[in-house]
Image (cartoon, grey):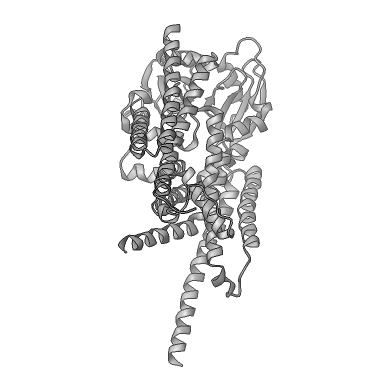
Amino acid sequence: MVKIKENNKLWAIHSWVGLYAGVIIAFLSITGAAALFRVELDHVFNPHLRSVTPEGRQLAMTPVVEKVKAQHPDKVLFEVELPVSATGSWNIRLLPKEQRRLFPIFWEVFVNPYTGEILGERNYYKSFTYYLRNIHVRFYEGFYGRQIVGLAGIALLISTVTGLLIYGRFMKKRFFGTIRKKNLRVSQADYHKLIGMLALVFNLMIAITGAWLGLQGYLQKWLNIERPNTFKLIEKPYSKEEDIALTFDFDSIYLASRTHFPQLMPVIIRPSTNGDGVVEVIGDVPKQVYERNSNKIVLSKDNYQPQFIYNISHDNAGAKLFYVQESLHFGDYGGLALKLLYGVLSLTSGFLALSGFIVYLERTRKKRFEQPKFVELRPLLLRWTAGILGTCVIIGILSGIWGIGIPTLVVVILFYSFILLILLKTVFGRIKRRIAKLNNQIT
Amino acid sequence: MTPTSNHTKEHLLIPLLIITGLPLLIGLFYLCHEYLMVYTNSETLEFYAFNDTDSRKKYLNSTMTGMVTCFVLFTLSVLSVRFKKSWLLLLLSLLNFSQLTYLLLYH
C-alpha cells in the first residue's frame, strides 16, 4: 500500500515536471542536436572563409596580424584562432574599442595562411554558428537564459530519475520493448517507455552536465570554485594601455609553446590586455576527453618564457570533473561518428517530451472535451511545433540581420510578458473562481 | 503473452544491459577515433609527442585492447541477459562504471 502511494507520488512528479518543462526540454533537444554540429556547419556554409588550398609554406603570422590591425584602427586585437588542419584559414578576432550595447561586435577576419589574402570578414554575433550556440545555451535571453537552461537540466534529471523509478510498475506484465497498438495513448506510452529506457544513461548525463553548465556561474560563486586553468598576477607589471601597445612575435610565441608544451595543439593565441604583459596559447592535448581549449601555456610578451603551464591530465580529480562536463555534454571528443550518435540520442529527450504530452492530452481528453476551448490533438501539436520552429526561425532572421542585441531585446520582452500574462491569468482565474464559490454559498 | 518469472527478470535485465551498453558504445567510438588518428598519421600526430615508433605502437595496442575490452564486456553483458544471470550483469555494470570513472578522473 505504501509502495503504491509512493509510486503515485513519483508518477505525479514525473507528469507535472514533464508537462511544465516539456516544451523547454523539447526546444533544447532540437537546438542541442543542431548546436552539436555548429563548427562543421560553419565550414559547410562558409567554405570561402574556412577552407584554403595549401601552397608551400605558411607565411609569418605577425605581419599579417599587423596588417589586419592597421585596417581596423577602431578595434583591438582579441585573439588569433589557428586552423586544426593544413586546409584551414587563420581567424583573426578583434573587439571594438567602444562596444555599442544594442549592436555589439565580435569581428572576425579570415586570412589565407599561405598567401596572406583576406578571405572575408564578419561580425561573429551575426553568424549562423553563433546563433546555434546562443539559442541552445541561453535562447537569446540576456539576463537569466543560461540559468533557465540549467533549471531545464534539473527538470530533465527529475523526469528521468522518476521515470526510471516508476518504469517497473508499467512493465511488470510485458516483454521489454513491446509496443501495443490498442490506441494512440497506449502506443505512445509504450514508445515513451522504450525510448526513455534506451536513452536513459544519455539523458541522465545530458541532464547533469546541462544543469551544471547552465548554473555554473552561480554554483562557482556559491561554492567558491575558480576555473582550474586561471592565470592571475597579483601585481600587474603594466597599465592596460601599455599592455595593449606591447609588441611581440606571434611565430616566436607559437614556437615557444611547442617547445615548452609539446603535447599542446595550439588553437588560440590570445595576448593579454589587462596589464599582465603575457600571451596565452590555448588548445587541446591529444587523448584527452576534457573540454576543448582548456589546456594552456602562458608566455611573457618580453622574453617568451613560460609563466604558467596548465595540462588537465596533471591536475587533480576535481579539476578533471570540472572539465569533463562540457565535453560529455557536447560529445566533441570522439570525432564526427560520436557526434552523430550524440545527435540521434539528443533528439530522444524531445521525443519523450512530445510522447509524454500526447499521453497526457489523450488521458485528459474527456475532461478537456467538456471545456469550451477544446482543441483536437493534431492542431494542438501543430500549433506547438509551429510555435517552436517559428520562434527559432524569427530569432535566426533577427540574429542574422542585427546580431545579438535586437533578438535578445525581443526575446526578453516577449518572454517576460508571457510569464506576466500567465501569472495574471492564474491570479485572476483564482479570484474569479473564489467569487463564484462565495456567490454559490450565499445563494 | 502470460507473465512468468522470466518476464520479470527480463524487464529488469534488459534496461540494465542498455544502461551498461551505451557508455561502452561511447567508449568504443572514442577508442576507434583515437586509433584512427594515430594509425592514419593524421595532422595531429606530432602533438601526441611519441618518442619513437615503439611508443606509438604501444599506444595503438592499448587503444586496440580497450576496444576489444569494450566488445568483450558488451558480449558478456548480452550473454548474461540471454542466460538470465543477473549477478554477472550487475558485476559487469559495476566493473564498467568504475573503469569509466577511473578513466575520466584519473587518466
Quadrant where the image shows the N terminus of chain A: bottom left
Name the image quarter holding residue A369. bottom right
Name the image quarter holding residue A228. top left
User: On screen, B43 above or below A382?
Assistant: above
> In the depicted view, which residue is nearer to us: A280 or A321?
A321
Q: Position of residue A314 (x, y in %)?
A: 34, 23
**Viewed as shown, does residue A166 lie left or right of A64?**
left
Q: Position of residue A65 (x, y in %)?
A: 57, 21
Residue at image point 52% right, 50% down: A178
Q: Position of residue A307 (x, y in %)?
A: 36, 20
Asked if residue A96 can be seen in this view, the reply is no
> In the depicted view, which residue is nearer to us: B21 or A204?
B21
The total of numbered circles placed on residues is 0
Residue at image point 56% right, 17% down: A61
> In the depicted view, which residue is nearer to us: A406 or B97?
B97
> In the depicted view, which residue is nearer to us: A32 or A81?
A32
